[in-house]
Every structure is written in structure tokens, then in C-alpha cells.
Image: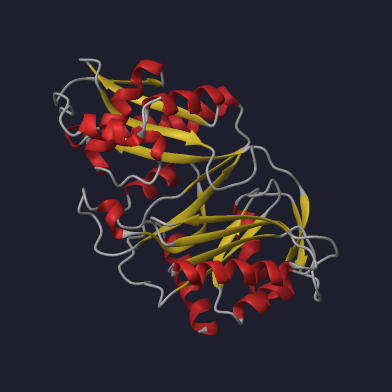
Amino acid sequence: MKTKTDVLNYLKNNVKSPRPGQTVNTEFFRPEDAMGVVSTCYAVYGEGYPVDTYYIPEKLIEENQKGNIHSVVARNADGDVVGHGALYHSSSPYAGMYEAGQYIIWKPYRGSGVIQEIDRYVTMLCPEKYDIAAMYGEPVTNHTITQKMGQIRGFIETALEIDLMPAQTYEAEESAQGRVSTLLTFKIRKDYPHTLYLPATYQERICQDIAELSLDRIAGPGQTGMPGAGKTKIIPEFFDFAGVGRLQVTCTGEDIYRAIQEFEDEIQKKEFQVTQLFLPLDQAGTDTLCTHLNGRGYFYGGYLPRWFGTDAILMQKVLPRPCFEGLKLYSDKAKQLLDYVRKDWERIA
């Protein structure tokens, strides 16, 4: 298998723009599409795309064969790949949850309906073909195109990740002046009814999202006191390119505060700007835990249905100061969410 460096060296002198103005056909991915997808990624993002799979054709084929990615491609009449989108395993630890995204379109084919047709395959046909339980999107806020598409497909905005992506990711497109925030939007095809222990501060907000998603939950205030006995189970992730640390807490135990402190110590060493904690809502003690985190500078990120198979809450910390200005938001719900997140930061700042 070629390395990313090998492929990039080849692409520097061998990427040609597809002929514009041709008819386009959208289909599920075939192995022979892999190099076309890689070339499209390189043409749009240069070397800055954060997922190495899209720079290594053999890896893209392998991930599709394993079912970790379900790719969709658009081809013009010449047979050249002019666009890509996918359902793929991403941040959520739950195997039944796929992210919808990785939309990459050659410039000559933007504004022609290509991305909308790819999105229809990704969010409507792929879930049926592969029996997907739950999906989420992570639309950026430096434009509203993917936000609009998500709303059309029935995705609901429930979380906002402030300053998640570094500006250099968008240098080739010149579409961002600073760090870019993203929304988290969800569409649940197969629900899993369960009991939630909600932090009192955020209970009303979360219950509104549960109702809008039509989920079956028994939801009440989180029990005060320490989380349950036993050992905390975590998945720490460090994204050096983005300056982001993410801690997935799949089980809260008596050592949860120590686990968070050790994670924060590592974040400080790396001088990351953004820290994210994904916490389970089906376990007792969330009220006390979130109050503790508020005191350490963490503010509300949002509600994440079926994130662990069960539901979760995102708490986030951004240094030196979150940038709430300049976000381009499409829906009234997204604007209200931004207002809520900002007010929570102001409350704990």
C-alpha cells in the first residue's frame, strides 16, 4: 500500500480538472473510483484534509469493504469522479452511528445539483441499503450549504462545537478567516428507549431536543453525589493538527475526576485550544459532574442522542476565549442554540 507521501508526490503533477458542463451520474462507490476520489480531495483541500484515508486509494477501498465507510461518488460523462460523500464511522463509539459528510466536489461542478444528489444517496439510500440505526452530521458554520441540506433530510441540530476546526483546513478554499465551529445534527432511525439522568441546569434544553427528535426517554434530574462505584472507562483522543483534545467517557466511576484531571494535564502540555468531554446521560451523578466541570471552565456543547448507543452530553472548554462571532447559521434553531451556548459560557466565565 502506498503511503500518503507517495500519493501526494504523484498528485502534485498529475491532477487534471474534469471537463465541465457534462451530465453527471451518482452511484455507490466502486474500487476503481478510489484514485478519482483522492484526486478530488487533493484538488479541493490540497494537503490539508484531516482524514488520511482520502489520500490513500487502497485505504479508501479497504475501509469501504469493511463497512467503516459507505462512499457515494458522482461521475461525469467522461467517467471522471467529480464529487464524493459518505456515511462513515467517526467520533461516536457506537457501531450503529454513522456520520454523514465528507462531501468533496470539484469547483466546476458546484452549483449544478451534484452535492444535493450525493446527499440524497448518503442520507436516504445508504441508510436503507446498509440498515443504519442512527446518523449525525457535522456541518461547518463558515457557510450554510450543508446546514440547509441537513434540514431538508430531517436532521435536527442539538449541539454546537465551538472553534473545532483550524483555519488552515480551509486555506485552499479561502473560506475561513479563523477557527471554524461546527454543528452536530442527528437523525435517529432506530430508537433505544432508556432512562436519563439530566443535569438540572440543562434539563429543560435537553428535554426540548428529545421531544423534537420524537425519542422515547424517561428523563429527570441527575442524581446528586458522586458517580457510581467502579472504574471509569474512557477513550482519549488528541488531534494535533486541530489543537483539539476529546475525552469520550463511556462509563463514569469513582475515579472520574482523576481521569479528567489527567486528561487535562495532557491537554495543557500540548497547548491545545479546545477540550471536549463526551459524557453518558444514562448514568447517575451527571448533575454533580457537570457542576464540577462548570467550575473548571466547561460550558454546554449539546445533547447527543445515541452517541454511546445511549445518550450523551457534550461539555467543552475553549482557550483563550471562544469565538462566537461570525458564525453563519441557517435555521432559527441553530441560532437559538448558539445563543444558549454563549449564555452558558458567560454564566461560568
Extreme-right residue of the structure = 229
Q: Is residue 125 above or below residue 141?
A: above
Please tell me which residue lies in front, 37 or 311.
37
**Residue 257 sits above or below residue 151 on the image:** below
Residue 119 shown left or right of residue 159 in the figure: left
User: For this view, does 4 lie left or right of residue 341?
Assistant: left
Q: Position of residue 222 (x, y in %)?
A: 76, 69
**How is colour applied across the structure in the image?**
secondary structure
Q: Residue at x 46, y 75 (%)?
A: 342
| Rendered image quadrant of residue 95 | top right
Percent position of residue 300, x then y: 56, 70
Does residue 105 appear in the picture of this structure?
A: no
Residue 252: x %, y % from top left: 75, 62
Q: Could you tell me residue 253's position as x and y percent?
A: 79, 63
Identify the residue at horizontal 51%, vertical 67% (top origin): 267
Q: Residue at x 27, y 43 (%)?
A: 47
Q: How many marks?
A: 0
The answer to whether one can see residue 152 in this image is yes
Quadrant position of the N terminus in the picture:
top left
Q: Say if 91 sits above or below 86 in the image.
A: below
Q: Which residue sits at x=30%, y=47%?
A: 48
Quarter assignment of residue 31? top left
